[in-house]
Image (cartoon, helix red, strand yellow):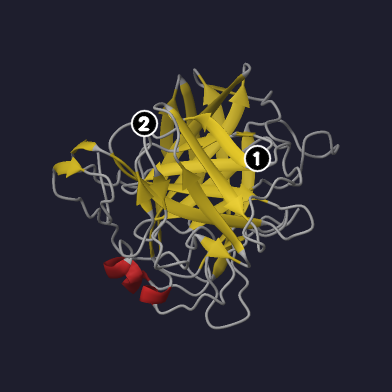
Amino acid sequence: MNTAMKLSGFALGLAAVFGAAYGVGQVAGPVTPTAESRHDGAEEAGHGTGADSAHGTDSEHGAGHGTEGPHLPAGLLVSDRGYTLTPVAAPAGEFAFRVLGPDGRPVTAYDVAHDKRMHLIVARRDLSGFRHVHPDLGSDGTWRVASPLDGPGVWRAFADFTPTGGEPLTLGVDVTVPGPLTARPLPAPATSTTVDGYTVTLAGDPQPGRTTELTLTVSRDGVPVTDLEPYLGAYGHLVALRQGDLAYLHVHPEGAPGDGRTPPGPAVRFLAEVPSAGAYRLYLDFKHGGTVRTAEFTVVAGTAAATAAPAPTGTATHGEPGHGHN
């Protein structure tokens, strides 16, 4: 499949306004988006609500395809094409939300995409604490899952789904977990990382405006892993979040398990296209030995230096906007 991931229409100058007009809340209590803004910060960046934040088809996840004005990447809108992501009150230790449809009612019918009807991805706004989970849907349209928000800070929650009869969407909203905050800078760019004894090596140098192959190679104790296991219909899933606005891209690798041409490792290949110089955090989910693991990388597209913008230390409180860190 064509897995080019595209970030369309945004320049890095948006970073100064990324923290404005996001919905915030508290995991153990009501968590709601801001009532006055359905675009969740897009207008402040100079982009109207006519832009489309769909995560695309199998061949293109995360590219926005709006019909008015510049295109938006996915995850920047809390409401798009009549659908709105609405966190709801939940008991401590649980995260819950609904997707409201064009009629204002909770959506209860979803198509299966990559083995699941809902993919919930969360990350702190300093790009730490990444989690990819799959909530359960209740008859009233409420999705529930053990809270993936691990620790204080302002988190971005992305709901990646396809409503039955509709187009694929990725909606995003900020939520706050109260508590002491500590600045956590973006890790330096690197071509290798380790997770649970596995080493994952990244090859490829993304350049703005060009399609680049990114190859992630998995080994264990110096031995290439040649028996990766299918996870959600693929040998790997790659989520990319752009530093600053946390524009969201979720792509799948070339080929598929059982297609007769795609080996189960050690290399998993993706095609990436980024339009602007700057820093991106990549999260590769892969499965081996019955366990899903996540390898994380910082990459810099172009020649712009990547610098973290740490938040002041302090305490996150209910309803606090901006860039929370832990």
5 left or right of 196 in image: right
Q: Residue at x 28, y 36 (%)?
A: 152
Residue 228 position, x and y percent, is 66, 26
- SS at circle 2: loop
Disc 1 is placed on an element classified as loop
Q: What distance separates the C-alpha of mark 2 from that of mark 1?
A: 27 Å
Q: Position of residue 29 (x, y in %)?
A: 37, 37
Q: Residue at x 27, y 53 (%)?
A: 323
The quadrant in which residue 67 appears is bottom right
* Other-residue count near label 2 (Cα within 10 Å), few / some / many at <14 / 14–19 / ≥20: some
Vertical comparison of 235 with 77: above or below: above
Which residue is tagged 1? 140
Badge 1: how crowded within 10 Å, few (<14), some, or many (20+)? Answer: few
Q: Quadrant of the C terminus?
A: top left
Residue 67 visible here: yes
| Residue 150: mark | 2
Front: mark 2 or 1: 1
Q: Residue at x 83, y 33 (%)?
A: 258
For residue 256, what is the image quadrant?
Answer: top right
Amino acid marked by disc 2? Asp
Q: Please indicate whether residue 89 sits to the left or right of residue 14 in the image.
A: right
**Which residue is depicted at the point 41% across and 43% down?**
123
- Amino acid under disc 1: Asp
